[in-house]
């Protein structure tokens, strides 16, 4: 609840005070979402790292999307998607580069806001 109303740092301190009870995936995922929503990117990375340590081998991925969004909003595109193990890695990145060039040529400039605008104007 603290995170939802923007008191993210206070929420993080509360979770730390919980000790082992605070080492709960759902609590930390909620805190990560609040960090993204309220622009607490540095704290979000700290929480995400804790989640990464906790989830090893469990196959959970929801917070990976949140962390990716945090990186995108900060303009750290190099961290947004880097799955070098994917069998189609080269093809995917080639396509992404082509799309980025088309967007740039059409006048699109990436923003740091959390709203993703429509790209229908770029469709051919």
Image (cartoon, rainbow, N blue to C red):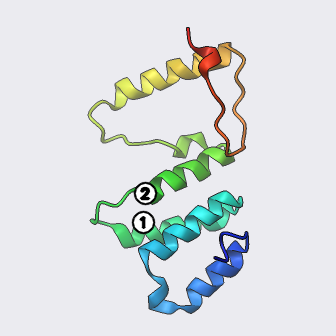
Residue 84 lies, in percent from the top left, at: 36, 40
In the figure, 86 relative to 54: above or below? above
Q: Can you identify the residue that label 1 sits on?
A: 52
Residue at image x 45%, y 82%? 23
Q: Nearer the viewer, residue 101 or 24?
A: 24
Residue at image x 66%, y 69%? 4
**First in sequence: mark 1 vs mark 2:** 1
Figure quadrant of the N terminus = bottom right
Residue 77 lies, in percent from the top left, at: 58, 40
Residue 43 lies, in percent from the top left, at: 64, 68
- Single out the residue that lies furthest toward the top: 124
Of the two numbered discs 1 and 2 in the rendering, the one whose residue sits closer to the viewer = 2
**Disc sitting over residue 62 in the figure:** 2
Q: Is residue 48 left or right of residue 35?
A: left
Task: Give the image quarter of residue 7.
Answer: bottom right
**Counting other residues with Cα less than 10 Å from the Cα at mark 1, is it few (<14), some (14-19), or many (20 or more)?**
some
Residue 39 lies, in percent from the top left, at: 71, 58
Task: Give the image quarter of residue 110.
Answer: top right
**Counting other residues with Cα less than 10 Å from the Cα at mark 2, is it few (<14), some (14-19), or many (20 or more)?**
few
Secondary-structure class at tag 1 = helix
Residue at image x 48%, y 72%? 50
Labels 1 & 2 near each other (Cβ < 8 A): no
In the figure, 91 relative to 14: above or below? above
In the figure, 44 relative to 79: above or below? below
Secondary-structure class at tag 2 = helix
Figure quadrant of the C terminus = top right
Cα separation between marks 1 and 2: 11 Å
């Amino acid at each position: 609840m603290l995170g939802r109303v923007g008191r993210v740092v206070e929420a993080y301190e509360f979770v730390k005070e919980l000790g082992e009870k605070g080492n709960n995936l759902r609590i930390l995922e909620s805190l990560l979402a609040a960090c993204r929503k309220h622009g607490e990117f540095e704290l979000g990375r700290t929480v995400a790292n804790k989640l990464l340590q906790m989830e090893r081998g469990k196959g959970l991925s929801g917070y990976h999307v949140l962390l990716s969004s945090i990186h995108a909003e900060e303009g750290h595109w190099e961290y947004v998607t880097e799955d070098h193990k994917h069998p189609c890695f080269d093809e995917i990145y080639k396509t992404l580069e082509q799309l980025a060039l088309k967007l740039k040529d059409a006048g699109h400039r990436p923003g740091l806001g959390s709203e993703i605008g429509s790209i229908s104007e770029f469709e051919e």
